[in-house]
């Protein structure tokens, strides 16, 4: 007698839950492919993705080939129109910290009168972003004291006329030019 051959095992039937899971996976994969892998449902496959290209920032203003911060450049342009000041001999640089904690930038200009000129701007404090011109005998005395790092600190005004001469205000005092003696003096507060 022969024995009946064994029947191959049948795979288990996929239940209703298995069919539902498979259906959801097919829908999710199809949606993902339809959206172009972007994850955004607002795009269609016929619309190319928009690419935002930012333009580079404009270069800083140039004065005689030197790049300057905009407030310093604007003051330089103004002074060129109204006074005889020359070109910068450097790009603006960090100024020494004043005794009052003020920090800022400075720029040396070509000296037509053999004394030189500075444009100085505080970047903090009550005179932040204001640029002042220091020139003539004021610049010699200011340099002797140590500039922005001295007890005079940063300028707080341009020079201005007073009876008998000129003055310029600084954080720690004033400089006075006597028209009679043609000498500059420090006036402490």
Image (cartoon, rainbow, N blue to C red):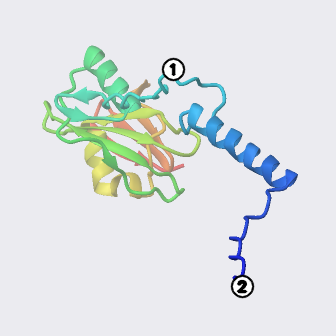
Q: Nearer the viewer, residue 64 or 23?
A: 23
Label 2 sits on residue: 1
Vertical placement of residue 57 versus 92, above or below: above
Decide if residue 103 is on the left or right side of residue 136: right
Q: CA distance from mark 2 to mark 1?
A: 74 Å
Quarter-of-image position of residue 5: bottom right
Q: Position of residue 78 (x, y in %)?
A: 33, 19
Q: Position of residue 32 (x, y in %)?
A: 61, 39
Q: Residues within 10 Å of mark 1 (few under 14, many from 20)?
A: few
Q: Residues within 10 Å of mark 2 (few under 14, many from 20)?
A: few
Q: Quadrant of the N terminus?
A: bottom right
Label 1 sits on residue: 47
Vertical placement of residue 50 versus 66, above or below: above
Which residue is at a point 28% across and 55% down the rendered structure image? Answer: 144
Vertical placement of residue 145 versus 79, above or below: below
Decide if residue 111 is on the left or right side of residue 176: left
Q: Position of residue 173 (x, y in %)?
A: 48, 47
Mark 2 lies on a secondary structure that is loop
Which residue is at a point 68% across and 43% down the rendered structure image? Answer: 26
Do the numbered discs 2 and 1 sit on residues whose CB atoms are within 8 Å? no
Comparing labels 2 and 1, the label whose residue is closer to the camera: 2
Which residue is at a point 80% across and 54% down the rendered structure image? Answer: 18
Which tag, 2 or 1, sits closer to the chain's start? 2
Quarter-of-image position of residue 23: top right
């Amino acid at each position: 007698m022969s024995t009946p051959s064994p029947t191959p095992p049948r795979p288990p039937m996929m239940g209703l839950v298995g069919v539902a899971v498979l259906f959801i996976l097919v829908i999710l994969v199809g949606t993902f492919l339809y959206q172009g892998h972007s994850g955004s449902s607002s795009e269609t496959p016929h619309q190319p993705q928009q690419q935002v290209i930012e333009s580079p920032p404009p270069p800083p203003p140039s004065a005689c080939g030197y790049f300057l911060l905009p407030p310093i450049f604007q003051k330089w342009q103004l002074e060129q129109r109204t006074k005889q000041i020359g070109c910068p001999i450097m790009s603006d640089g960090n100024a020494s910290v004043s005794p009052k904690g003020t920090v800022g930038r400075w720029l040396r200009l070509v000296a037509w009168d053999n004394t030189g000129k500075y444009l100085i701007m505080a970047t903090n404090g009550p005179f932040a972003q204001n640029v002042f011109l220091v020139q003539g005998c004021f610049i010699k005395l200011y340099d002797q004291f140590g500039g922005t790092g001295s007890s005079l600190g940063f300028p707080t005004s341009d020079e201005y006329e007073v009876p008998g001469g000129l003055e310029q205000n600084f954080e720690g005092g004033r400089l006075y030019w006597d028209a009679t003696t043609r000498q500059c003096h420090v006036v402490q507060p």
